């Protein structure tokens, strides 16, 4: 089953394994309210094919425990461990004003907030454990680069305009701070106490 680029799939959870001996499935959720995953009912795999249907769910300290038709034993539930669960973007509630989903950032133009210089476009949003970062593809080609998704580095996001205004941190080797005056070639270095 093909995934539509107009309605991308959004990762909402991952199967953590079985719970008990009756085939209940533990799911680690990536939703703000863990129980909202039960509202989607039919969850998909990354390729868009069916993954799980949730018949009932209850909250636990680290996610939810669900009953899913076709999963009747602990072994069957454990076999699903690691399965990533997706829903179409259209299934998510519309964000409030001045809010957005991270997936909405993909494809946006990135410009420097002070110079208006075109920096590239957002290729993806990643999180390797230290917070969200934007992978930027330069419009003129070359390797992608990463921009921390912090208020300091990304002060403005204008999803409706397709624009991100960024103030990227200095690259390795770039000068930071005010220019230091060099010594005139006639001056001698003095001793420092």
Image (tube, grey):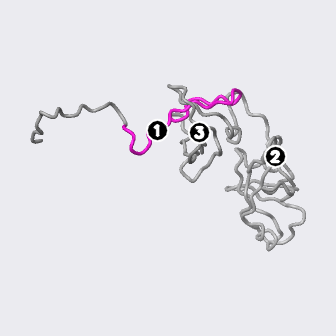
Q: Mark 1 points at which residue?
A: 169
* Mark 3 / mark 2, whichever is N-terminal: 2
Q: Are marks 3 and 1 in contact (CB under 8 Å)?
A: no
Residue 139 x, y percent position in the rendering: 61, 38
* Nearer the observer, 172 or 169: 172
Q: In this view, does 74 lie to the left or right of 182?
A: right
Residue 61 x, y percent position in the rendering: 67, 55
* Image position of 48 with respect to 174: above or below: below
* Mark 2 / mark 1, whichever is N-terminal: 2
Can residue 62 be found in the magenta stretch?
no
Q: What element carries label 1?
A: loop
Give the foreground label among 2 and 1. 1
Q: Distance between the residues labelled 3 and 2?
A: 32 Å
Q: In this view, does 70 lie to the left or right of 157?
A: right
Q: Name the residue under label 2.
A: 88
Q: Mark 3 points at which residue?
A: 140
* Image position of 28 with respect to 176: above or below: below
Quadrant the N terminus occupies: bottom right
């Amino acid at each position: 089953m093909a995934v539509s680029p107009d309605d991308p799939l959004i990762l909402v959870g991952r199967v953590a394994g079985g719970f008990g001996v009756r085939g209940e499935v533990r799911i680690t959720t990536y939703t703000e309210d863990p129980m909202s995953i039960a509202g989607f009912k039919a969850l998909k795999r990354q390729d868009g094919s069916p993954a799980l249907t949730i018949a009932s769910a209850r909250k636990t300290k680290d996610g939810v425990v669900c009953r899913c038709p076709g999963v009747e034993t602990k072994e069957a539930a454990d076999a699903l461990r690691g399965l990533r669960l997706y829903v179409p973007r259209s299934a998510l509630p519309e964000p409030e004003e001045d809010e957005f989903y991270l997936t909405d950032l993909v494809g946006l133009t990135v410009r420097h907030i002070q110079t208006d210089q075109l920096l590239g476009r957002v290729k993806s949003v990643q999180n390797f454990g230290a917070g969200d970062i934007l992978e930027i593809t330069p419009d003129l080609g070359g390797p992608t680069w990463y921009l921390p998704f912090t208020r300091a580095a990304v002060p403005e996001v204008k999803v409706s305009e397709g624009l991100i205004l960024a103030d990227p941190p200095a690259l390795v080797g770039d000068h930071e701070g005010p220019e230091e005056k060099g010594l005139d070639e006639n001056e001698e270095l003095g001793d420092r106490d």
